[in-house]
Image: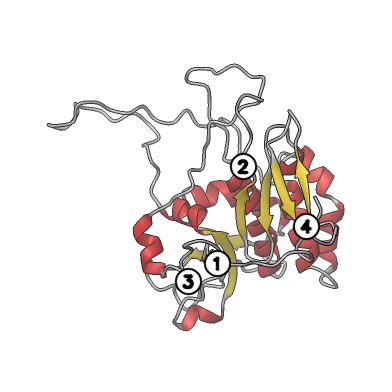
């Protein structure tokens, strides 16, 4: 796509039956301009927390030509896989070549396997914790903070307190909220009867049976940027990415190459966005 006035290329348009329609703007050819009734003042963290816009970890994603299946397992969200690819690269840099511990629950399910494989065992571990609005102040001995990115400004939150100097790993706000929320359904069916006044009980999401895998392309891009001129062990990880794909740690294809998906990651802000807009009849 080119500028109507000067003819300079400004964007690329994806228009293919096997991909979501999308327009990718060239960052060096365009600039942001506020239009319409866009808010001049971004929302505060308190206002964002009140909205509770959690990105679900599982989504009913299917191919264009795949028939709908009732009770089919929902795969891991492509937005989570992309965001985790970026966060995993930050965690490796923050580790300084030492083991890293993460909180239990979804955070452990997303990062534990990759961290245990990519980092050595033996040295004293570094501790990563969730930190941000609505959560208790992190302990002073926390080495790494998993913090949200403001969806409007792209600013990575800096918690106050003694742990403010810890390494901050940026996460999209929707995923950060999901990591800090309890599981939407218990791992086993609850016993007993429904409480009085409850007319129905929604079934649990038919979640994916496979282990979580971060997006390979986002992980590689972020680690290349963070490790430029850095430690040899980080460069060795980059060289061995095909091996980690075969081991099931990373997606075999980047999200931008998977049929039916088009995910954009703003590597400056840490925000992961879906580039969609396809005509459902196509």
Residue 169, above or below 256:
below
Q: Residue 88: which quarter of the image? A: bottom right
Horizontal side of 240 relative to 66 (left or right) equals right
Q: Is there a contact, CB below 8 Å, between mark 2 and mark 3? A: no
Q: Specify which label sits upstream in the sequence, 4 or 3.
A: 3
Distance CA(mark 4)–CA(mark 3):
32 Å
Tag 1's secondary structure?
strand
- The foreground one among 259 and 139 is 259
Of labels 4 and 1, the one closer to you: 4
Horizontal side of 123 relative to 176 (left or right) equals right
Tag 4's secondary structure?
helix
Tag 3's secondary structure?
loop
Of labels 3 and 1, the one closer to you: 3
Tag shown at residue 78: 2
Tag shown at residue 208: none
Residue 5: image x %, image y %?
Answer: 80, 60
Residue 210: image x %, image y %?
Answer: 60, 33
Distance CA(mark 4)–CA(mark 2):
17 Å
Q: Residues within 10 Å of mark 1 (few under 14, many from 20)?
A: some
Q: Which residue is mark 4?
A: 221
Q: Residue 209: which quarter of the image? A: top right
Q: Residue at x 16, y 32 (%)?
A: 195
Q: Residues within 10 Å of mark 4 (few under 14, many from 20)?
A: some
- The foreground one among 105 and 213 is 213
Distance CA(mark 4)–CA(mark 1):
25 Å
Q: Which residue is mark 3?
A: 40
Q: Residue at x 41, y 70 (%)?
A: 44
Q: Which residue is mark 1?
A: 127
């Amino acid at each position: 796509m080119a500028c109507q006035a000067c003819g300079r290329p400004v964007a690329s348009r994806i228009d293919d039956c096997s991909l979501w329609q999308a327009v990718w703007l060239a960052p060096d050819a365009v600039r942001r301009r506020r239009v319409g009734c866009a808010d001049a003042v971004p929302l505060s963290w308190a206002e964002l927390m009140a909205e509770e816009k959690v990105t679900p970890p599982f989504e009913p994603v299917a191919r264009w030509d795949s028939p709908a299946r009732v009770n089919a397992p929902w795969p891991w969200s492509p937005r989570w896989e992309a965001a985790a690819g970026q966060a995993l690269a930050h965690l490796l840099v923050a580790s300084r070549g030492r083991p890293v511990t993460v909180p239990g629950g979804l955070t452990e399910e997303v990062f534990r396997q990759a961290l245990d494989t990519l980092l050595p065992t033996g040295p004293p571990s570094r501790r990563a914790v969730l930190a941000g609005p609505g959560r208790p102040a992190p302990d002073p001995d926390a080495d790494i903070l998993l913090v949200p990115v403001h969806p409007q400004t792209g600013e990575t939150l800096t918690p106050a307190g003694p742990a403010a100097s810890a390494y901050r790993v940026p996460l999209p706000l929707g995923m950060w909220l999901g990591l800090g929320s309890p599981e939407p359904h218990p791992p086993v069916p609850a016993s007993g009867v429904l409480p009085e006044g409850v007319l129905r009980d929604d079934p649990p999401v038919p979640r994916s049976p496979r282990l979580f895998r971060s997006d390979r392309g986002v992980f590689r891009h972020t680690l290349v940027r963070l490790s430029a001129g850095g430690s040899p062990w980080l460069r060795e990880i980059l060289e061995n990415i095909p091996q980690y794909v075969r081991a099931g740690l990373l997606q075999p294809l980047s999200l931008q190459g998977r049929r039916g998906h088009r995910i954009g990651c703003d590597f400056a802000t840490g925000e992961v966005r879906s580039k969609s807009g396809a005509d459902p009849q196509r």
